[in-house]
Amino acid sequence: LPPPRVLRIVQLSTGIRPSGLRALATDGLRIYFSEEQAGRYSLATMSVSGGEPALISTPIQSPFLEDIPPDGSEFLVTDRPDSRLECPLYIVPVVGGSARRVGNIEVGCAGWLPDRTKILYVRPDGLYLTNRDGSGTRKLASIPYPYWPRASPDGKLIRFSQWDPKTMAHSLWQVAPDGTGLRPLLPGWNNPPNECCGQWSADGRYFVFQSTRGGVTSTWAIRESVGFLRRAGIEPVRLTDGPIETFAPLVSRDGRKVFVIGRQTRGELTRYDAAARQFV
């Protein structure tokens, strides 16, 4: 297979503020995200072809979208009314029904396993796996400050991001669902590492993530090994390269597109007025 490449970039929305890094999910027809307004979050949706977003009503005070399963039937959300690192976790049906809390656990962020019977979640001390009702919780990896856990479509591999408070570096890691084989995904590829927020394509052939190099955040892709005698092309391929920075990449269900949050930073020249003691 040839390396993936971007043929064109289309802007789908204007004037919205998708919140945080864990921002995008899709069921194939619509894109879902959390939008921040006055310090509170709301669930929002829009067509994959673009248009005006619409808010989704939920009984949760400040719903922050974590993930959506392959069949698109349920949201996994945390309730984040303030700046706490760990928050209650809920399962919310996409169409009708009431929100159900996942036991009494509080999490930093979370993600579905493909069969929806189990949920990955993180706390400052490591990566965990639990049943959808919050029972049977077990720790998969003892690693400080993990975030953004995602399972491969076949459920055989888990990848997540990790923040090192000593070096301020962000890196990608992987581990098996039984907790074995914990290792960094791209050791030595970017020095210092500054990668995060990976997602698999629905067929498991590609893994996309964001990486910051030279002060610019771009989208990258890794070709995965699929089937007998096929070797993984572990060397990442850059998909985007400014001037717009791209964050939180998400592959469309048909594998033909990648949705991203685009941001272009702007600055202006200012002068300090010593007499007035202010910038003008």
Image (cartoon, helix red, strand yellow):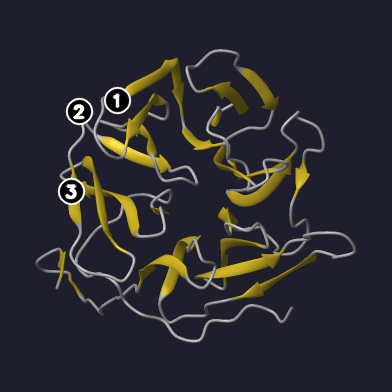
SS category of the residue bearing label 2? loop
- Residue type at the position of mark 1: Ala
* Residue furthest to the left: 276
Residue at point 73%, 41% (across, down): 156
SS category of the residue bearing label 3? strand
Dot label at residue 59: 2
Q: How many marks?
A: 3
Residue at point 15%, 44% (across, down): 38
Gap in angstroms between the C-alphas marked 2 and 3: 13 Å
- Residue type at the position of mark 3: Leu
Dot label at residue 99: 1
Residue at point 30%, 32% (across, down): 80
SS category of the residue bearing label 1? loop
Gap in angstroms between the C-alphas marked 1 and 3: 17 Å
Query: Which badge, 2 or 1, is on the more N-terminal residue?
Result: 2
29 lies above or below 86: below
Whether the residues at callouts 2 and 1 have beta carbons within 8 Å, the answer is yes
Q: Nearer the viewer, residue 210 or 52?
A: 52
Dot label at residue 55: 3
Whether the residues at callouts 2 and 3 have beta carbons within 8 Å, the answer is no
Provide residue 35's location: percent of width, then percent of height: 25, 50
